[in-house]
Image: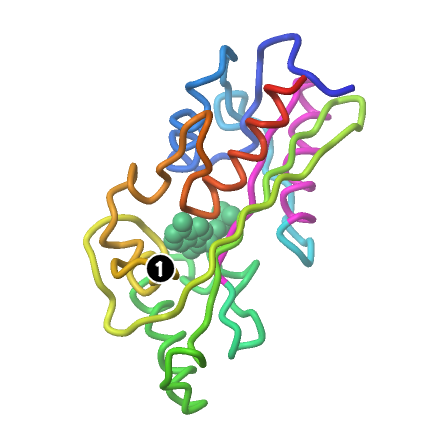
């Protein structure tokens, strides 16, 4: 049975933004958070073919190298008309300069080329797969998904990545127009809005029922 009896959790990431977002989402729990970056663990090659596989590669590598329970995430945006691209390649579409203005305009250009003008042809979703991995090899996945559509031009000054072109179903603000607390709106007893918050809600439920 998986639990966090050592009260220590390793965030399997070298990305400062992601580490601080994890800290924010985990501050309800009485666990000491450390990261692969702090421990200077090498970064594994992410050559999985799904969000879950990539999350597993990161968490397994970190847990095996450190001997500490590790939590990782892999996330991205899937555009239906583009056969779910960029998907697991969402970060890579922005190139080494992390040019998301370019990556967002590529999505729009490809949709325009397909003649995907109407809202139903611009369906997309954000996905987040979390993997909790124990040095013993036991592991669990927690997946969150939020549906919406691609809008153009980009809207909003908040967020990162593809936030400014993603309009979640049921809201008239893009992720880029929502503050971080509105976007995640997560609490221990409430399922949040974003794909990451939904995955975290599942993770929290799993931990608290232990
Ligand atoms: P990862 O670090 O390999 O998981 O890369 C995830 C990539 O997906 C990020 O670099 C962003 O481009 C994109 N992404 C994931 N979640 C979000 C989000 O909440 N908003 C905007 N972009 C996101």
Q: Is residue 166 left or right of residue 155?
A: right
Tell me which segment is drawn in magenta: 52-77
Percent from the top left, x then y, of residue 50?
A: 66, 56
Q: Quadrant of residue 135?
A: top right
> Where is mark 1, residue-wise?
170
Q: Quadrant of residue 210?
A: top right
138 over 28 or under it: above or below: below
Residue at 35% of width from left, 37% of height from top? 185
- Say which element carries label 1: loop
Residue at 59% of width from left, 30% of height from top? 71
Comparing 28 with 31, the one in front is 28
Comparing 206 with 162, the one in front is 206
Locate the N terminus by quadrant: top right
Q: Is residue 114 left or right of residue 178?
A: right
Percent from the top left, x then y, of residue 58?
A: 63, 38
Residue located farthest toward the top when viewing the structure as drawn: 6
């Amino acid at each position: 049975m998986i639990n966090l009896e050592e009260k220590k959790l390793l965030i399997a990431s070298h990305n400062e933004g992601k580490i601080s977002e994890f800290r924010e989402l985990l501050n309800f729990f009485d666990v000491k958070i450390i990261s692969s970056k702090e421990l200077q663990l090498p970064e594994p090659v992410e050559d999985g073919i799904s969000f879950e596989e990539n999350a597993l590669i990161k968490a397994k590598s970190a847990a095996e190298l450190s001997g500490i329970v590790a939590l990782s995430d892999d996330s991205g945006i899937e555009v239906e008309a583009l056969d779910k691209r960029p998907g697991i390649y969402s970060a890579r579409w922005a190139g080494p300069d992390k040019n998301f203005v370019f990556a967002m305009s590529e999505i729009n250009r490809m949709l325009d080329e397909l003649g995907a003008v109407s809202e139903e042809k611009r369906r997309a979703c954000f996905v987040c797969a979390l993997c909790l991995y124990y040095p013993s090899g036991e592991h669990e996945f927690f997946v969150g998904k939020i549906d919406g559509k691609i809008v153009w031009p980009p809207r909003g000054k908040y967020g990162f990545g593809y936030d400014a072109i993603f309009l979640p179903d049921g809201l008239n603000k893009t992720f880029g127009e929502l503050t971080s607390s509105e976007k995640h709106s997560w609490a221990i007893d409430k399922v949040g809005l974003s794909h990451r918050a939904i995955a975290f809600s599942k993770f929290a439920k799993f931990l608290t029922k232990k």
